[in-house]
Amino acid sequence: MSDTPCPARHQYAAGIIENYDDHVLIVRCPAEAAVPRQWLFPRGPVQPGEAPEAALRHLLHEQLGLRVEIVVGQPPLVAMLDGEEVELRYFFCGIATGTPQAGPYAEFRFVSRLHLAEYDFDPASAEVAQWLQHPR
């Protein structure tokens, strides 16, 4: 048995941004991305020593021009991003201020939870999109 600790996974935070009529914000990656033209929930890396909530707030403001209120976080899950196993944590959010802008993404849309199945999600987002389709 080895005493060598397992290397820590990189952490990512993702936002499930809901609006007043139960639609969620999804974004599409540009053609040159690792998952070209697939849809996902906005996400980004958590820097060492940074709280995932702080990382998500910073990311959403920088990328989409939104300030959000985090309602609740989900337990972390393990996902593959760019060939690396990472810890990904989703947070349900509401928009406090701002209007979404595409930023680094090819496009964005607010989509009814019931219609998420119509979109081609990247593998890290597909399971969450499927879960969101079921009534709460």
Image (cartoon, grey):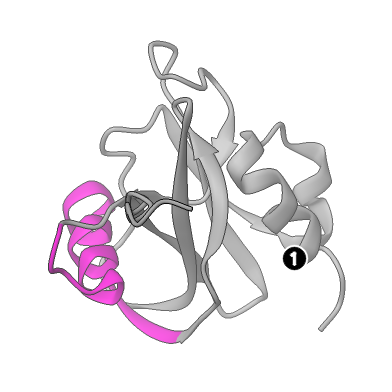
129 above or below 29? below
Residue 96 % position (x, y): 30, 81
What is the crowding at mark 1: few (fewer than 14 residues within 10 Å), some, or many (at least 20)?
Answer: some
Residue 25 % position (x, y): 53, 56
**Left or right: 13 in relation to 24:** left
The residue that label 1 is drawn on is 132
Residue 134 is a magenta residue: no
Q: Say which quarter of the image contains residue 87.
A: bottom left
104 above or below 46? above
- Residue that lies at the very extreme toward the bottom in this rendered image: 71
**Left or right: 117 in relation to 20:** right
- Residue range (magenta): 48-71
Residue at x-position 59% and y-position 62% = 24
Q: Say which quarter of the image contains residue 122.
A: top right
- Residue that lies at the very extreme toward the left in this rendered image: 49
58 above or below 22? above
126 above or below 31? below
Residue at x-position 39% and y-position 51% = 43
- Residue that lies at the very extreme toward the top in this rendered image: 32
Residue at x-position 33% and y-position 49% = 7
Residue 4 % position (x, y): 32, 52
Q: Say which quarter of the image contains residue 53.
A: bottom left
Compare residues 8 and 105 and report the one nearer the observer. Answer: 8
Under mark 1, the amino acid is Leu
